C-alpha cells in the first residue's frame, strides 16, 4: 500500500527538482527569431552593406537580395495584393555597441525602401491582374549617418523584418520569416572604399504586357479531381491514422456478424465523419476567399506551436491506450451492437478523428491536390476538397457494404493486440517528430510535461479498477488531475524569451542606452534558482507587461548569474550591491538610481512604473525624452 503514495511523492519531487534543469534549456535564445540568411524551399534571402565602413554624416545603403525558385512570386502592390499580403520591409531599432571605452552617440535614419520594377501576373483564382516580384531581385534600404563622438569603430546591429505572402499558381504561403540581422560599421576617420553596388534613384515603372485570359482546361480539372481522390485514398495508409485502425478493424469484424443493412449504415456513418472534416475545410476556404481574399493552407495549423503541442500530447495518450494503460469504454458505440444512436454517433466520431489524425502525415500528393483546389473558383474548389474526403472514405464504404469481403477479414485475436502495441511505438516516434519542430525554448518543457502526463495517465488507468471503492477512485484520479495541472503550469506556458526580446548582459550596451536616456530593464536570474523561474511565470510571462516593454521602447537585459565568474554575476555584487537573485532593476530617464524589485510578487509595481514612461512613436522613433 505504501508504494502508490511514495510514487506520488516522487513525481512531486521530480516536478520541483527538474524545474531547475529545465530552466537551463528554456532560457536559451530562440534562434528562429533572427538569421543572417533565410533559406526555405522556395526563397533565399540575404543582406549586405554598400560599404565595409562608413563615416558619420555620410549616406549609404543596405541591399536585400531575394532569390525565388521558378513559378513563385511575392505580391508587389498593396492595392492589388489579396488580403494586403504584399511584400513589406521594416527596419527595426538598433542599439550601437562599442569596441573601446567611451559611449558612442549617433543617429541612423533609414529612408523608404526602394523596390525593383514589378511584373504583371494574372491570377485565375480571383480573375484579376496583379503586380508581383519574381525570380532574383534586390531591395535597397538607404540610410544617413548622423554625428559620432568617437573615432573608434562602432558596430551598429540592424534587424530587418520581412512580411508578405509567397505564392505560386497552386498555392500561397504566409511564412513567419525570422528577422534578418547585419552590422553597419561606423568610424569617425574611416576612408570610404569602393561601393559594392549603386543604389537606384527611384523605382522603375512596371512592365506592361497584354493581360492574360483565363484558359478553359477541362482535362486538367478532371485530372486534378482524380488526383484528389487518390490523395484521399493515400490517407488510409498514413501512420497518423493508425490509432483508430484497430478500432475500425474490430468494428468491421463485428459487423460481419450482423445484417448487410446494419453493416452498410454503420459504415456510411463512419464515412460521414470523414466527410464532415473535409466539409469544414471547404467551408473555411469559402469564408477566407470571400471575406479575406486569401486561401486556406493545408497543414497551416502546424505552424501554431500550441496546436503542435496539443497534437503531440494526444499522440502520446493514444500510444498509452495502445499499450493497454487505460481503456475507452465505447464497445457498443464502436461495434454498433445496439440500435441506439450511440452506435452511429460513435462511428461518426471515429471517422472525424481518423480524418483529423491524417493531417500531420499527409503525402505531397495531398498538398498538391488541395492547393490546386484553392486556385479555382469556389464551386470546383469545394468539389475538389470534398473529393479528397470521398477518396479517404471509399475503402470503408466498400468493406462495410460488401459482406463477401468482410468474411475474408482475419478474426480478432492476439495479432490485433500486437498490432495495437506496435502502432503505439510508431505514435511515440511521430510525437517526438512533432515536438522537434517546436521552438527551441519550448521543446524541453513539453518533454518534461509529456513524462508527467504519461505518469498521470498510467495512474488514472492502473491504480484503480472497476471494483475500487468510489471514494478511493475519486481521490486517486483527483491527484492525477492536480499533478497534470501543476505540470502544465510549470512547463507549458510560453517562455518569456518569445514574449520579450531579451538582450544578453553587456555593460557597454547598457551604458550606451543610458547615455541616450533610454529606459533599461535588467533581470538578474540563474538556472539553479527556482524563485527566478517563478518570476518568469508570474511577472514576465504576462502579456501586458511584455507589450509595455515593447511599447515604451525599454531595453530588456537578461543578466545570467549561473556561472560564478560571469559578467552579470560580478556586476550584481560589485556594481549593484545585491546579495542574490532574483532581482530586477528598472533605469528610468531622469532618475539617478534604478527602481529595484526583489522576490517574486512585483508584477503590478513594474506595470505601474512602465505605464509612467513615454510611448515610442509608431515609426519606431522615440519621443523627445527618450531620443
Image: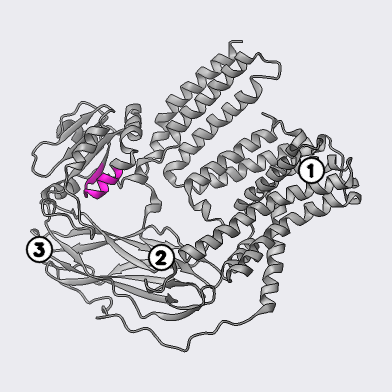
Q: Which of marks 2 and 3 is nearer the N terminus?
A: 3
Q: Toward which corner of the image does residue 54 lie, by quadrant?
A: bottom left
Q: Which of the two discs, 1 and 3, sits closer to the camera? A: 1
Other residues around mark 2 within 10 Å, as few (<14) / some (14–19) / many (≥20): many
- Inter-mark Cα distance, 1 to 3: 76 Å
Q: Which of marks 1 and 3 is nearer the N terminus?
A: 3
Disc 1 element: helix
**Vertical placement of residue 5 versus 227, above or below:** above
Q: Is residue 553 magenta?
A: yes
Disc 2 element: loop
Question: Residue 596's spot in the image, x, y percent?
Answer: 18, 32
Q: Is residue 242 in view from this perspective?
A: no
Q: Which of marks 2 and 1 is nearer the N terminus?
A: 2
**Which label is found at residue 164?**
2
- Inter-mark Cα distance, 2 to 3: 35 Å
Q: Toward which corner of the image does residue 224 lie, by quadrant?
A: bottom right
Report whether 104 appears left or right of 305: left
Name the residue tied to disc 1: 249
Q: Do the residues labelled 1 and 3 touch (CB within 8 Å)?
A: no
- Inter-mark Cα distance, 2 to 1: 46 Å
Q: Which colour scheme is used?
A: one colour
- Give the magenta part as a residue range: 546-557
Q: Does the magenta stretch include residue 428?
A: no
Q: From the viewer's side, name the closer residue of 618 and 386.
A: 386
Q: From the viewer's side, name the closer residue of 370 and 72.
A: 370
Amino acid at each position: 500500500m505504501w508504494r502508490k503514495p511514495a510514487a506520488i511523492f516522487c513525481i512531486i519531487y521530480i516536478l520541483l527538482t527538474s524545474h531547475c534543469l529545465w530552466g537551463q534549456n528554456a532560457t536559451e535564445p530562440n534562434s528562429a527569431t533572427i538569421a543572417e540568411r533565410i533559406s526555405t524551399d522556395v526563397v533565399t534571402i540575404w543582406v549586405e552593406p554598400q560599404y565595409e565602413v562608413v563615416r558619420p554624416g555620410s549616406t549609404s545603403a543596405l541591399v536585400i537580395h531575394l532569390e525565388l525558385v521558378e513559378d513563385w512570386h511575392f505580391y508587389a502592390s498593396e492595392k492589388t495584393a489579396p488580403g494586403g499580403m504584399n511584400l513589406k520591409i521594416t527596419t527595426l531599432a538598433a542599439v550601437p555597441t562599442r569596441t573601446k571605452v567611451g559611449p558612442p552617440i549617433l543617429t541612423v535614419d533609414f529612408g523608404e525602401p526602394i523596390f525593383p520594377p514589378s511584373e504583371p501576373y494574372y491570377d485565375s483564382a480571383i480573375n484579376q491582374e496583379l503586380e508581383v516580384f519574381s525570380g532574383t531581385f534586390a531591395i535597397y534600404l538607404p540610410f544617413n549617418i548622423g554625428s559620432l563622438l568617437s573615432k573608434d569603430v562602432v558596430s551598429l546591429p540592424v534587424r530587418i523584418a520581412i512580411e508578405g505572402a509567397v505564392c505560386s499558381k497552386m498555392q500561397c504561403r504566409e511564412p513567419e520569416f525570422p528577422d534578418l540581422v547585419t552590422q553597419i560599421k561606423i568610424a569617425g576617420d574611416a576612408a570610404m572604399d569602393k561601393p559594392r553596388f549603386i543604389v537606384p534613384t527611384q523605382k522603375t515603372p512596371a512592365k506592361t504586357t497584354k493581360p492574360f485570359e483565363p484558359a478553359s482546361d477541362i482535362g486538367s480539372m478532371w485530372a486534378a479531381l482524380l488526383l484528389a481522390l487518390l490523395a484521399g485514398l493515400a490517407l488510409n495508409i498514413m501512420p497518423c491514422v493508425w490509432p483508430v485502425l484497430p478500432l475500425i478493424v474490430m468494428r468491421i469484424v463485428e459487423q460481419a456478424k450482423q445484417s448487410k443493412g446494419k453493416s452498410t449504415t454503420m459504415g456510411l456513418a463512419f464515412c460521414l465523419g470523414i466527410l464532415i472534416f473535409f466539409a469544414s475545410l471547404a467551408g473555411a476556404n469559402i469564408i477566407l476567399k470571400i471575406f479575406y481574399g486569401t486561401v486556406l493552407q493545408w497543414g497551416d495549423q502546424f505552424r501554431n506551436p500550441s496546436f503542435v503541442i496539443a497534437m503531440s500530447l494526444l499522440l502520446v495518450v493514444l500510444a498509452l491506450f495502445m499499450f493497454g494503460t487505460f481503456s475507452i469504454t465505447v464497445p457498443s458505440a464502436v461495434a454498433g451492437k445496439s440500435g441506439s444512436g450511440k452506435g452511429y454517433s460513435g462511428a461518426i466520431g471515429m471517422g472525424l478523428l481518423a480524418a483529423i489524425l491524417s493531417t500531420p502525415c499527409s503525402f505531397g500528393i495531398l498538398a498538391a491536390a488541395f492547393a490546386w483546389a484553392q486556385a479555382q473558383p469556389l464551386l470546383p474548389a469545394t468539389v475538389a476538397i470534398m473529393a479528397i474526403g470521398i477518396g479517404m472514405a471509399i475503402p470503408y464504404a466498400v468493406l462495410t457494404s460488401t459482406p463477401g469481403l468482410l468474411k475474408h477479414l482475419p478474426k480478432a485475436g492476439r495479432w490485433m493486440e500486437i498490432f495495437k502495441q506496435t502502432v503505439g511505438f510508431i505514435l511515440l516516434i511521430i510525437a517526438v517528430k512533432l515536438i522537434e519542430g517546436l521552438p527551441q525554448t519550448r521543446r524541453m518543457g513539453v518533454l518534461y510535461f509529456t513524462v508527467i502526463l504519461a505518469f498521470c495517465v498510467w495512474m488514472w488507468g492502473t491504480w484503480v479498477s472497476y471494483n475500487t471503492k468510489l471514494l478511493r477512485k475519486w481521490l486517486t484520479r483527483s491527484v492525477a488531475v492536480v499533478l497534470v495541472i501543476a505540470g502544465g503550469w510549470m512547463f507549458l506556458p510560453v517562455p518569456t524569451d518569445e514574449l520579450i526580446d531579451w538582450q544578453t548582459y553587456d555593460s557597454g550596451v547598457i551604458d550606451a542606452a543610458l547615455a541616450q536616456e533610454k529606459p533599461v530593464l535588467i533581470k538578474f536570474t540563474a538556472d539553479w534558482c527556482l524563485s527566478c523561474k517563478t518570476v518568469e511565470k508570474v511577472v514576465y510571462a504576462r502579456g501586458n507587461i511584455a507589450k509595455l516593454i515593447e511599447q515604451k521602447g525599454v531595453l530588456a537585459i537578461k543578466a545570467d548569474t549561473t556561472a560564478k565568474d560571469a559578467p552579470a554575476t560580478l556586476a550584481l555584487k560589485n556594481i549593484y550591491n545585491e546579495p542574490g537573485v532574483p532581482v530586477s532593476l528598472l533605469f528610468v530617464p531622469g532618475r539617478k538610481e534604478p527602481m529595484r524589485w526583489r522576490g517574486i510578487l512585483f508584477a503590478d509595481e513594474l506595470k505601474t512604473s512602465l505605464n509612467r514612461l513615454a510611448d515610442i512613436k509608431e515609426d519606431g522613433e522615440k519621443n523627445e525624452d527618450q531620443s
